[in-house]
Image (cartoon, grey):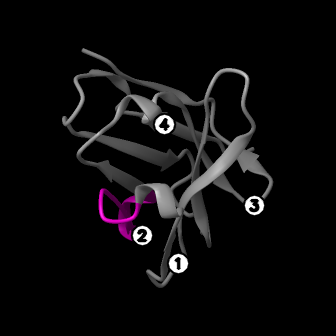
């Protein structure tokens, strides 16, 4: 069973940056399109950004110009670079590939 493992969350001040990573546990697993989602307390889980195997990207309007999704297919890893973070970005961030979800990593933006 392939697993997706996220890392890189934490506490950051407004205006700061974090980089999240999502690694597939099986080295030969071709993840296809991978998405980063987030879920704030009491809210639905929403798509933040996605990237196809060949690198085509898509972003939610709320993060355009601040977040960048990228991938290293040789390492089965997808990244989410988050800059100019705002308190509204506080959420648990999840990695998704098809029917597979990671366990989530908490991002807290607060002074």
Q: Secondary structure at mark 1?
A: loop
Q: Residue at x 23, y 45 (%)?
A: 84
Q: Which is nearer the eye, 88 or 46?
A: 88
C-beta proximity under 8 Å, tags 2 and 1: yes
- Pointer 3 local density, CA inside 10 Å: few below 14, some 14–19, many at least 20: few
Q: Quadrant of residue 74?
A: bottom left
Q: Is residue 76 visible?
A: yes
Q: What is the span of residues highlighted in magenta in the rendered image? A: 64-77
Residue 6 - label = 4
Of labels 2 and 4, the one closer to you: 4
Q: Is the residue 107 above or below the residue 5 in the image? A: above
Residue 37: x percent and y percent? 60, 47
User: Mark 2 and mark 1: span between their CA atoms?
Assistant: 8 Å
Residue 20: x percent and y percent? 37, 42
Q: Which residue is disc 1 drawn over?
A: 53
User: Mark 2 and mark 4: span between their CA atoms?
Assistant: 16 Å
Residue 2 - label = none
């Amino acid at each position: 069973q392939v697993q997706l493992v996220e890392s890189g969350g934490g506490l950051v001040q407004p205006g700061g940056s974090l980089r999240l990573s999502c690694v597939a546990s099986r080295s030969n697993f071709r993840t296809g399109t991978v998405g980063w989602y987030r879920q704030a307390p009491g809210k639905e889980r929403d798509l933040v950004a996605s990237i196809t195997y060949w690198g085509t990207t898509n972003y939610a309007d709320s993060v355009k110009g601040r977040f960048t999704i990228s991938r290293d297919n040789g390492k089965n890893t997808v990244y989410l670079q988050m800059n100019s973070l705002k308190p509204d970005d506080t959420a648990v961030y999840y990695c998704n590939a098809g029917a597979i979800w990671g366990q989530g990593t908490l991002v807290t933006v607060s002074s």
